[in-house]
Image: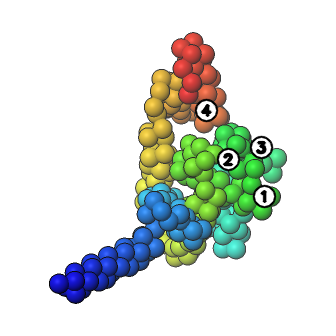
């Protein structure tokens, strides 16, 4: 009478072992499991995937930057070096335009410095998350810091921020930008007037995609609205330095609204 019970117990034990063994691989293989933290490679790949939409959106912009650099009189090596070293789309377009117009080096450097000065604000904002990292991380992420990377990682808290995630996002965007620039350089050498195909709209489209999701309060809305109105108005009247004035006007408006309403931006 006892033997069947032992057999049933053994069967139940073997079933439970089978169940436990079948559960274990699922937990190990599932990177999203709460019991299994992501390793550095998985975080890096997650960052790459998160940046894919913005990397795709910036391709026309990179094509334009490469072709415009060739049209401005730079050779292919100089044109590619501009993307590899400067790595700032709007500054590159303005710089190549000023080179084509014969602007002096001092004017060129000052204009580039002003256009890219927003990255100083980005770095200050992310100081709490990046400042405690080793020097090699600070230098790497500092070089890769762009509008797109800030849009993805800028609002992350110190606990949520992952350096490998940020590195994957920033490095994948850097490679995509330089590849698009290279294609633009080659295309610009063989296809005349490539910059007349309307690729410059990619610049506006990219910034719209970055700005709109972050308009979450009245100071930000006021700053964006004022910058937009000033930019359009000053350009219609062909005022020199319209971009700089619109940027300053937007920042000042946002600060005033934040001060008056007591609502943080």
How many C-alpha atoms fall within 10 Å of the one at disc 2: few (<14), some, or many (≥20)? many
How many C-alpha atoms fall within 10 Å of the one at disc 3: few (<14), some, or many (≥20)? few
- In the rendered view, how is the structure colored? rainbow
Say which residue label 2 marks.
Answer: 129
Say which residue label 1 marks.
Answer: 134
User: Taking the image as drawn, is residue 44 in sight?
Assistant: yes
How many C-alpha atoms fall within 10 Å of the one at disc 4: few (<14), some, or many (≥20)? many
The first of marks 2 and 3 along the sequence is 3
Distance, label 1 to label 4, CA atoms, is 33 Å
Give the position of the N terminus as an image quadrant: bottom left
Give the position of the C terminus as an image quadrant: top right
Distance, label 4 to label 2, CA atoms, is 26 Å
The first of marks 4 and 2 along the sequence is 2
Left or right for 260, reference 206: right
The first of marks 1 and 4 along the sequence is 1
Check contact, mark 3 vs mark 4: CB within 8 A.
Answer: no
- In the picture, the disc for residue 110 is 3
- In the picture, the disc for residue 247 is 4
Check contact, mark 3 vs mark 1: CB within 8 A.
Answer: no
Distance, label 3 to label 1, CA atoms, is 31 Å
Q: Residue at x 57, y 20 (%)?
A: 258
Q: Nearer the viewer, mark 4 or mark 2?
A: 2
Q: Secondary structure at mark 3?
A: helix
The first of marks 1 and 2 along the sequence is 2
């Amino acid at each position: 009478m006892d033997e069947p019970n032992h057999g049933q117990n053994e069967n139940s034990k073997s079933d439970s072992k089978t169940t436990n063994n079948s559960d274990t691989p699922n937990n190990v293989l599932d990177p999203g499991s709460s019991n299994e933290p992501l390793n550095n490679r998985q975080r890096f790949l997650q960052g790459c995937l998160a940046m894919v939409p913005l990397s795709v959106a910036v391709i026309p912009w990179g094509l334009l930057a490469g072709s415009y650099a060739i049209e401005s009189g730079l050779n292919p090596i100089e044109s590619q070096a501009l993307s590899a070293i400067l790595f700032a789309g709007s500054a590159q377009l303005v710089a190549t335009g000023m080179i084509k117009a014969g602007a002096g080096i001092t004017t060129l450097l000052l204009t580039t410095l002003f256009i890219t000065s927003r990255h100083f604000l980005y770095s200050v904002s992310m100081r709490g998350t990046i400042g405690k990292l080793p020097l090699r991380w600070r230098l790497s992420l500092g070089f890769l810091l762009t509008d797109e990377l800030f849009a993805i990682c800028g609002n992350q808290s110190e606990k949520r921020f992952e350096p490998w995630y940020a590195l994957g996002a920033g490095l994948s965007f850097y490679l995509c930008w330089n590849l698009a620039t290279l294609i633009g350089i080659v295309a610009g050498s063989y296809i005349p007037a490539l910059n007349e195909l309307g690729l410059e709209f990619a610049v506006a489209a990219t910034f719209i995609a970055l700005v709109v999701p972050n308009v979450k309060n009245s100071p930000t809305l006021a700053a964006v609205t004022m910058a937009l109105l000033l930019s359009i108005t000053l350009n219609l009247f062909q005022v020199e330095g319209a971009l700089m004035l619109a940027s300053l006007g937007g920042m000042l408006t946002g600060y005033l609204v934040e001060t008056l309403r007591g609502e943080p931006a």
